[in-house]
Image (spheres, helix red, strand yellow):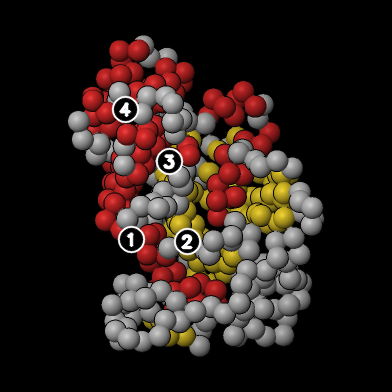
Amino acid sequence: MTEPLLLVSHLHMHIGSARGAVRAVDDVSLAIGAGQALGVVGESGSGKSMLARAIMGLLPPRAVRSGSILFEGRDLMALPVKQQRDLWGKRIGMVFQDPGRSLNPVVRVERQLTEGMRRHLGVGRAEARTRAVTLLDEVGVPDPERRLGNYPHQMSGGMRQRVMLAIALACEPDLLIADEPTTALDVTIQRQILDLLRRVQRSRGMAMMLISHDLSVVAGRTDRVAVMYAGRLAETGATREVFAAPRHRYTHALLDATPTLHQERHARLRVIEGSLPDPTAPPPGCRFHQRCTAAVEGCAGGPIEMESVGVDHRIACLNPVVTSHLVGAGGAHDGR
């Protein structure tokens, strides 16, 4: 069996606060194979972005990590800082949520796009500029040579996100982490960026972790999906199987709350009552049990381990959905 490109095992990231340790990531294990696209989904505050930051080593103040993060068999957490920095950008790239905050407002696009190539690939200024023009063209930036002279504020939000993607791809990484890459973009631009990500990922044979709170974003653009809730994994599996037959009650509720074209025009949207638990004092047992309409005795007990319910399909649920079938592309489901 081929070793995964990225293997995260029992990863914890707790952040100190005045009210106690925030359990942002709590015992998460997942894998991404070479050339594979993994979607990480869940409500805002479920720990998705913190998982990405823990993998990248971008730790907030007073954060403590434990567990292991293996990239091609090397534990990133055990590597010296210099060796870790040699991997960021060159082997692992990242697209952040807000390009307006991630791009330097007083530095032209050319410098921001070429400095990684010059550092990691050792190319000269002229070659780096040529590669930069090609990259901007690849990600759909019109008149790329002229755009190299722009400052970020001279570009639209969609164009800035394309520049961020070009920067992340500049050194041809083996793994790209895209953290909510369409935040604050209008619907048309969102789709263009997402389709571009998938197209580039496939054409380059690159692995990708696509993080989103919107299930429709990952539905047709990832091979596998991991559903997070309150810092923990609730369900993982092949995207098609999880969407067609979600087994965890939280995944089922998320899909139930997603509008579809098959619903009556004036039908009330389903919602998940309640809110995420306090991350400094999460409830025992299943962290979703306080909002779950199908909780049983034991859900509020001790830790609930991930168990297999199919080929490459795992859940952490004591009372899983027994039957479920896909009604529409958006994921309207029936289940018991």
The type of residue carrying mark 1 is Gly
Q: CA distance from mark 3 to mark 4?
A: 14 Å
Q: Earlier in the sequence, mark 4 or mark 1?
A: 4
Q: CA distance from mark 2 to mark 3?
A: 18 Å
Q: Residue 92, percent across and down?
A: 48, 35
The type of residue carrying mark 3 is Pro
Residue placed under numbered mark 4 in the picture: 150
Mark seen at residue 213: 2
Q: Report whether residue 11 is seen.
A: yes
Question: Few, some or many C-alpha atoms within 10 Å of disc 2 (few <14, some 14-19, many ≥20)?
Answer: some
Q: CA distance from mark 2 to mark 1?
A: 15 Å
Q: Residue 190, percent across and down?
A: 32, 54
Q: Residue 39, percent across and down?
A: 45, 56
Decide: marks 2, 1 in contact (CB < 8 A)? no
SS at badge 1:
loop
The type of residue carrying mark 4 is Asn
Question: Few, some or many C-alpha atoms within 10 Å of disc 1 (few <14, some 14-19, many ≥20)?
Answer: few
Q: Nearer the viewer, mark 3 or mark 4?
A: 4
Horizontal side, residue 39 vs residue 320: left or right: left
SS at badge 4:
loop
Decide: is 174 above or below 336.
above
SS at badge 3:
helix
Residue at (29%, 51%) from the top-left corner?
189
Q: CA distance from mark 3 to mark 1?
A: 24 Å
Residue 98: quadrant of the picture: top left
Residue placed under numbered mark 3 in the picture: 99
